[in-house]
Image: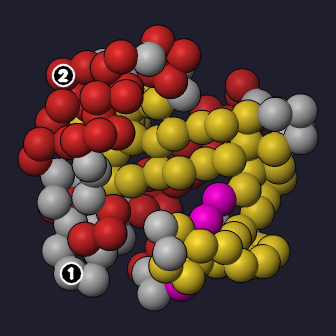
Amino acid sequence: MYEKYRIEALDERNAEIIAECWRYPEPYEFYNADHKRYREFKEDNEKKKQYFQVTADGSLVGYFHLKTDDRFVNLDFKMKPELCGQGRGKQFLNAIEKYLHRYQKGQTIVGDVLSSDERALTLLKHMGYAQCGYAELKNNPAIRYMKKA
């Protein structure tokens, strides 16, 4: 099923749904939202400007978080757990890239993915991202990727 995605600022209702209801199964439980991050989101208006929701037909299908500077857009994205592994990742990431191309044109997209997350790493490779180094995510080995926006 192919949907038309809509991207807008993450609202508090959907942020709460993500924090309270989204639970990724093993071995992806690392990606589960924590309540501390949700509280920070609720209390920090500047942080709210960095989070975006992705919806289709009025339903939340994912979100992403951006940190930007003059050259780089640091991208962290998550798809709703029930939708993962169904072949929707390419279309989902493509929608995010179109958004970034419109608003962050010319910058390089960078991000980190757990080295054990084969689904995400395969998606990034198919979408033209290049491995550019290694990182750590909460003491877990990760791979840094990049692509021109």
Q: CA distance from mark 1 to mark 2?
A: 26 Å
Magenta region: which residues? 111-115
What colour scheme does the image use? secondary structure
Residue sitting at x 39%, y 53%? 78
Badge 1 marks a residue whose secondary structure is: loop
Residue 80 shows up from this direction = yes
Relative horizontal placement of residue 116, taking residue 35 as reference (left or right)? right
Image quadrant assignment for residue 85: bottom left
Image quadrant assignment for residue 70: top right
Residue sitting at x 18%, y 31%? 16
**Where is residue 10 drawn, in percent x and y?**
37, 24
Q: Are marks 1 and 2 in contact (CB under 8 Å)?
A: no
Q: Which residue is mark 1?
A: 26
Front-most of 42 and 49? 42
In the depicted structure, whether residue 106 falls above or below residue 92? above
In the depicted structure, whether residue 30 falls above or below residue 79? below
Residue sitting at x 73%, y 34%? 68
Residue type of the residue flagged with mark 2: Arg
**Where is residue 9 drawn, in percent x and y?**
43, 20
Residue type of the residue flagged with mark 1: Glu
| Magenta stretch encompasses residue 40 | no
In the depicted structure, whether residue 132 falls above or below residue 23? below
| Magenta stretch encompasses residue 113 | yes
Specify the principal SS of the magenta part: strand
Residue at the extreme top: 45
Relative horizontal placement of residue 57, taking residue 148 as reference (left or right)? left
Earlier-in-chain disc, 1 versus 2: 2
Q: Which mark is residue 13?
A: 2
